[in-house]
Amino acid sequence: MENRILQKLQTFFLEANDEERQALEHVIDAVIRKQMKQNGSYIGGLLQTNRSVIDDQTYEITIPNTELIQNPLQIVHGGITATLLDSAMGSVVHHVLPKDKAAVTTEMKINYVAPGIGKEFRCVAQIIHKGTKICVTEGRVFRDDGTLIAHATGSFFIINRPEQNNHK
């Protein structure tokens, strides 16, 4: 497998321009961040998430705006915005659950209200309702100039955490 990867990289570098090389560097950095446990997932590493708990009901994730997450119009891709919202809303739910519980997204509604441009994006998520089976959340994504670019609500189904993950 190592030779196959090295061969692909060699072929890539023969044809790649600076933008493509920079994109590959972002992807490699993402894998390293996951490997070094700086991010809990490859997608978190790819987005370069910076996470923080604001209070018992509020969670925040910021990500830089890179060419890797932009659509052809140089605006953050709507799917990336959705991923950011889902991650922040899911994280706030996990923050309030006991260690033996987890949650999975069951529904999410997003309103995109302004283009995702600027140097970074900040997503703030809050708990609206915490029941025994369902948590309802709200999330907002802001540009670095403070402009709201997306608003979402999400529902998360509470499940028992699988046994092999109880120690995490």
Image (tube, rainbow, N blue to C red):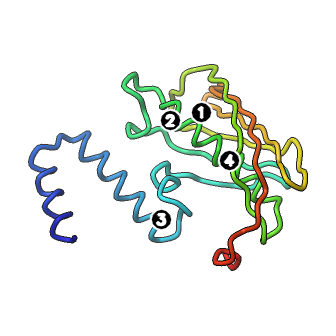
Front: mark 1 or 4: 4
Q: Dots 1 and 2: beta carbons under 8 Å?
A: yes
Residue ID at (29%, 46%): 22
Residue type pointed to by label 4? Ala
Quadrant in the picture for the C terminus: bottom right
Residue behind mark 3: 34
Q: Quadrant of residue 108 in the image? A: top right
Q: Amino acid at mark 2?
A: Lys
Residue 163 is situated, as x and y percent measured from the top left of the image, at 69, 77
Q: Tell which of 101 and 6 is nearer to you.
A: 101
Q: Residue at x 65, y 74 (%)?
A: 165
Q: Amino acid at mark 1?
A: Asp
Front disc: 1 or 3 = 3
Q: Secondary structure at mark 1?
A: loop
Badges 4 and 3: C-beta atoms under 8 Å apart? no
Q: Residues within 10 Å of mark 1 (few under 14, many from 20)?
A: some
Q: Could you tell me how far apart the alpha carbons at marks 1 and 4 are, in whole angstroms?
A: 17 Å
Question: Dot 4 corresponds to which residue?
Answer: 88
Badge 2 element: loop
- Which residue is at the front of the view, 163 or 112? 163
Residue type (three-letter) at the residue carrying disc 3: Lys
Q: Which label's residue is closer to the chain start, 3 or 2?
A: 3
Where residue 119 is drawn, which disc sits there?
2
Q: Residue 144: which disc? A: 1
Q: Residue at x 70, y 34 (%)?
A: 140
Question: Given this view, does label 4 or label 2 mark the residue nearer the observer?
Answer: 4
**Quadrant of res 30:** bottom left
Q: Is residue 37 left or right of residue 161?
A: left
